[in-house]
Image: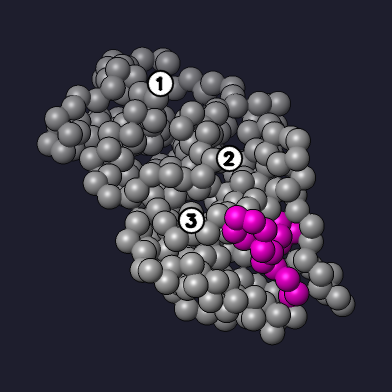
Amino acid sequence: MFVYCSPAGGSDAAAAQGVRPSREGKSDPVEFHILGPLQAVDGGRQIRLPGPRPRLVLAVLLLEPGRVISVDRLVETVWDGEPPASMRTQIAIAVSALRRTFREAGLGDVIETVSPGYRIKAGARIDACIAEEHVAAARAAAADGRAEEAAVLYRKALALWRGPVLAGLDSSRIITCGLRWEELRLTVVEELAELDLARGHHHQVAGELMALVAENPFRERLRAQLMTALARSGRQAESLAVYQEGRRILKDELGLEPGRALRDLHEAILKDAPSVQQRPTPLHVSAPTAVRAGLAAPCRHRGRHRAGGLRRAAVHHSGL
C-alpha cells in the first residue's frame, strides 16, 4: 500500500495525477502528511481531522491517490478482518465525517464516490509523493555524476519524514505498509551515505552512521559503511569492533554469520588494504526489488508475526 504517485502510463497515470479539488480563491492545494502522524494542512493551517475510523479511511485513500478503493478494502483495513454487521454503513458515516470536515475548511469535494468505493482527488499534495520525486531525482543526478545535487535531493526527501508512517493508526495493514516505508527511508539513508563516503566525507558521516547502526543492527550495508568511515578516519580498532559487535548480534539473534561482503571488508581492514581507502565514483544505487515493486502496489499482507522476517529481510536487502 505504498503511495501510488507516478504510474508508468495509460489511464492509470491520468487517474494518479488527478484533478485538483475546487478551491476558489486559494492558490495552493491542500497538503496531506503521512510520513508521520496523519495530517491535513491548508495554507499552513492544520485541519482538525475527525476520529480514528475516518482517519483510517482517509489514510487508505491517501496511500493510493486517484485510485478507487473499494468499500471491501476499506473494511478490511479498518477492522482487520473482523468487521461488524454494520460495516458498510459505518464506512459511509466515516466518509461523510471527512467530507464535512473538508467542506468546513473550504476545500470542496476532496473525496469522490466512485463504484465500488471511494477515491481521493490526487491534486492534493502528499508528502510521500514529494519524497518519492526527490529520491527519483537524486538517483538520476547520482547516475549522471552530479553527486552534490544528488546529496541535496536525498536530504530533502529524508527531511519529510516526521516519524513512523501514519503513526497512531491502529491497523495491522497500515503498520505493515509503514514498515515498508521505513525500508525505503533506510535505503535512501544508505544511498546518501554511499555518496558521502565517495566524496571523502567519512569524518562527518561516522557519527551519524553510529546512531543508525545502533538503531538498525541487522542492516549490514549500514554497518559496512560505518566500518569504512571509521577505517578511513584512522580509527581501525573501532572499525573492527563494529564488525565484531555485528557478528555477535547476528549469531545471537538470528543464528547467522555476517555476509560475504562484510567479512571481506573486515579482512581488508585487518590487513590495512589500499582498497579500504579508495573512494569509488558515486554510482546510481537502486532500491531493493521488493521496495521498488511496492511503490506502485497496494499492501496486501498482514502485519502480524513479522519481527523475525523483517530482521532477515534487513540482512538480505543489505546486499552483503
Q: Position of residue 230 (x, y in %)?
A: 36, 35
Quickly name the residue at label 3: 72
User: Within the image, what quadrant is residue 285 found in?
Assistant: top right
In the orientation shown, which residue stands out farthest toward the bottom? 104
Quickly name the residue at label 2: 296
Q: Amino acid at mark 1?
A: Val
Q: Secondary structure at mark 1?
A: helix
Q: Position of residue 68 (x, y in %)?
A: 63, 53
* Residue located 52% across and 23% down the image: 279
* Residue located 51% across and 39% down the image: 294
* Residue located 55% across and 29% down the image: 286
Task: Residue 163: tell me if it is visible.
Answer: no
Indicate whether 269 appears above or below 306.
above
Mark 2 or mark 1, earlier in chain: 1
User: Within the image, what quadrant is residue 159 found in?
Assistant: bottom right
Q: Amino acid at mark 2?
A: Ala
* Residue located 33% across and 50% down the image: 303
In the orientation shown, which residue stands out farthest toward the front? 85
- 53, 196: nearer the viewer: 53
Q: Label 1 neighbourhood size at 10 Å, few (<14), some (14-19), many (20+)?
A: some
Q: Secondary structure at mark 2?
A: loop
Q: Secondary structure at mark 3?
A: helix
Q: Amino acid at mark 3?
A: Asp
Magenta region:
107-131
